[in-house]
Amino acid sequence: MQANRPIPKQYILKPPYGYEELNWNTRYQNEYNLKNINGLSWHQGDVEYTKLSDILAKELEECTLIIVVGSDKKRFLEKYITSVPIIDLEYKLKLKRVHNYITDCQAHDPQYNGFRCAMNHVFKIFTYMGKIEYDFKKLQ
């Protein structure tokens, strides 16, 4: 979500390979994530994983700063983006303390409503930063 364009876009990527290729530990972790973390199945997705680089380049071409919450997300994006600083707010922002927003996220099975939704987190971060008039220059 860009500050001058507060309409988020959401992409759910197809898995990079089939479920049958996962080892048992990864399958267990995926089932745990489905039931307890994000409500997303390994089989979900409508965009080929190979298009990720092109999507990121297109969507982030005007960005001067990328904000994420979580070191894993930062490391993941750093593989694809080298020209823009990526800031991890994990230790500065506790999303549990920020009000939940009702989002029209179509990615989750209705039985998993209330789980950690990335779209909800985007709204939380954007709203929180706007309320406190955060000075992004401090982050760089």
Image (cartoon, helix red, strand yellow):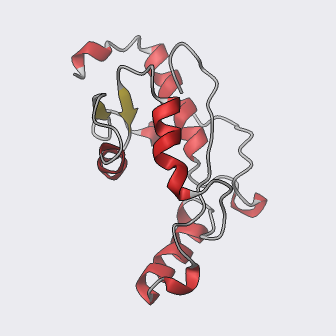
* 28 lies left or right of 46: left
Point out the image quarter for the N terminus: top right
Residue 29 vertical position relative to residue 89 in the rendered view, above or below: below
- The spot of residue 135 in percent (x, y) is 31, 12
Name the quadrant containing residue 44: bottom right
Work out whether residue 137 or residue 56 is closer to the camera in this orientation and state it: 56
Residue 95: x and y in percent read 45, 39
Q: Which residue corresponds to the image point at 57% horizontal and 78% vertical from the top-left?
A: 18
Identified at 31% across, 48% down, the residue is: 79
Residue 54: x percent and y percent?
50, 41
| Residue 101, placed above or below residue 107 | above
Q: How many marks?
A: 0
Q: Nearer the viewer, residue 106 or 80?
A: 80
At a point 44% along the width and 79% down the height, the residue shown is 26
Question: 66 or 38, which lies in front?
Answer: 66
Which residue: 45% across, 19% down? 62
Q: Quadrant of the C terminus?
A: top left
Extreme residue toward the right, this view: 110
Q: Is residue 98 visible?
A: no
Q: Quadrant of residue 46?
A: bottom right
Q: Is residue 120 above or below residue 43?
A: above
Residue 93 horizontal side relative to residue 139, left or right: right
